[in-house]
């Protein structure tokens, strides 16, 4: 073998090693959900929230509808943080029309969003809650129209599966994404609702089917077992707490190609906000190190 051939082989091997290492990184944007009010010392203003999360090491904070949207976005940007997702209720009924004020607010938030940001919708409907076949036809027309509007801004949309809403399951969210059939419309997954509504059994199949459409994920500590019977105190815990393998869930996502933002579910958490968020961030950093070092 010539010297040049040997050098070529060595270079190729180094390139493959580099690519393999790069693929092993867990570098998803990590944000906090904007549900911090349960903490005894919860930050109140957009500025307080942004400064706290920046000091702990989060990449951003979820928006929570139209209220304080502009002030929160400005505060986050001043700290160099992102609003990767915005939680926006989307009610619809038999006429297939959005309320004018809802439509106006959603479109205003889309226009003000940065390219790549996501609006996820807990879908709400009284008349279609028990008639998904008819309801899907109505809501997908609305979602298609909003997706077409959002496309020119580079903004993405998706349903937010949530217990006791029109779309409760990841499977239903995937079905809607296929029906809407727009590149900027997809799926989100919230671990606590997945466990509460669908359970932990078969979770690998659920995630693999969702990943091609998946835009956003929220995780937390939780207990495993008969999760459909558990209350939120067992299904929403600080990251690193509980018996459910949240690291394994995160690894499943990334191993199957998910590279989007991952949020920390904070709903109804109690105690000291700094202590709990710092503990969750320490766990997240541990996840990153563990993922990088695994064979």
Image: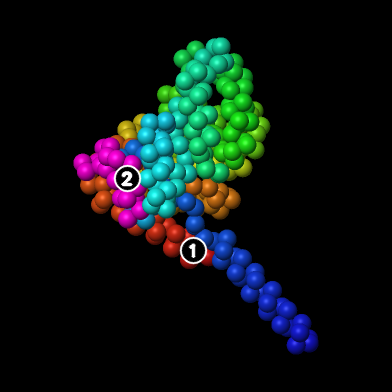
Q: Is residue 257 magenta?
A: no
Q: Which residue is drawn at 52% across and 60% down?
A: 25
Residue 14 is situated, as x and y percent measured from the top left of the image, at 63, 74
**In the image: residue 181, left or right of residue 74:** right
Residue 134 is situated, as x and y percent measured from the top left of the image, at 59, 16
Q: Which one is earlier in the sequence, the residue at label 2 or at label 1?
A: 2
Estimate how packed mark 2 is, as few (under 14), some (14 to 19) or many (20 or more) residues with alpha carbons within 10 Å.
Answer: some
Q: Does the magenta stretch include residue 42?
A: yes
Most foreground residue, 104 or 277 = 104
Most foreground residue, 121 or 103 = 103
Q: Name the residue under label 1.
A: 292
Q: Residue at x 39, y 50 (%)?
A: 78
Q: What element carries label 2?
A: helix
Task: Using the rendered image of the protein, determine whether residue 70 is visible from the camera's viewpoint.
Answer: yes
User: Would you place residue 128 above or below residue 220 in this image?
Assistant: above
Q: Name the residue under label 2.
A: 47
User: Would you place residue 112 above or below residue 239 in this image?
Assistant: above
Disc 2 versus disc 1: nearer the observer? 2
Q: Which residue is drawn at 49% across and 57% down?
A: 26
* Residue segment shown in magenta: 37-55
Task: Using the rendered image of the protein, determine whether residue 129 is visible from the camera's viewpoint.
Answer: no
Q: Residue at x 42, y 30 (%)?
A: 66
């Amino acid at each position: 073998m010539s010297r040049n051939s040997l050098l070529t082989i060595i270079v190729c091997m180094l390139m493959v090693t580099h690519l393999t290492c790069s693929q092993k990184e867990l570098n998803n944007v990590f944000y906090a959900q904007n549900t911090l009010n349960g903490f005894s010392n919860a930050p109140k203003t957009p500025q307080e929230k942004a400064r706290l999360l920046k000091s702990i090491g989060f990449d951003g904070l979820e928006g929570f509808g139209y209220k304080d949207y502009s002030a929160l976005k400005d505060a986050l940007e001043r700290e160099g943080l992102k609003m990767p997702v915005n939680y926006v209720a989307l009610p619809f009924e038999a006429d297939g029309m959005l309320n004018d004020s809802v439509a106006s607010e959603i479109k205003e938030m889309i226009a003000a969003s940065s390219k790549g940001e996501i609006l996820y919708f807990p879908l709400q409907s009284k008349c279609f809650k028990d008639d998904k076949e008819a309801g899907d036809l109505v809501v997908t027309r609305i979602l298609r129209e909003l997706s077409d509007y959002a496309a020119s801004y580079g903004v993405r949309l998706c349903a937010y599966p949530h217990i006791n809403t029109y779309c409760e399951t990841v499977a239903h969210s995937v079905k809607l994404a296929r029906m809407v059939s727009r590149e900027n419309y997809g799926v989100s997954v919230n671990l606590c609702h997945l466990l509460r509504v669908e359970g932990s059994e078969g979770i690998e199949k659920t995630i693999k089917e969702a990943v091609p459409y998946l835009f956003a994920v929220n995780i937390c500590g939780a207990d495993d077992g008969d999760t459909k019977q558990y209350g939120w105190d067992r299904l929403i815990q600080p990251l690193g707490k509980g018996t459910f393998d949240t690291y394994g869930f995160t690894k499943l996502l990334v191993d199957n190609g998910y590279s989007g933002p991952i949020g920390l579910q904070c709903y109804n958490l109690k105690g000291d906000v700094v202590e709990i968020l710092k503990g969750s961030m320490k766990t997240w950093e541990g996840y990153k190190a563990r993922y990088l070092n695994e064979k």
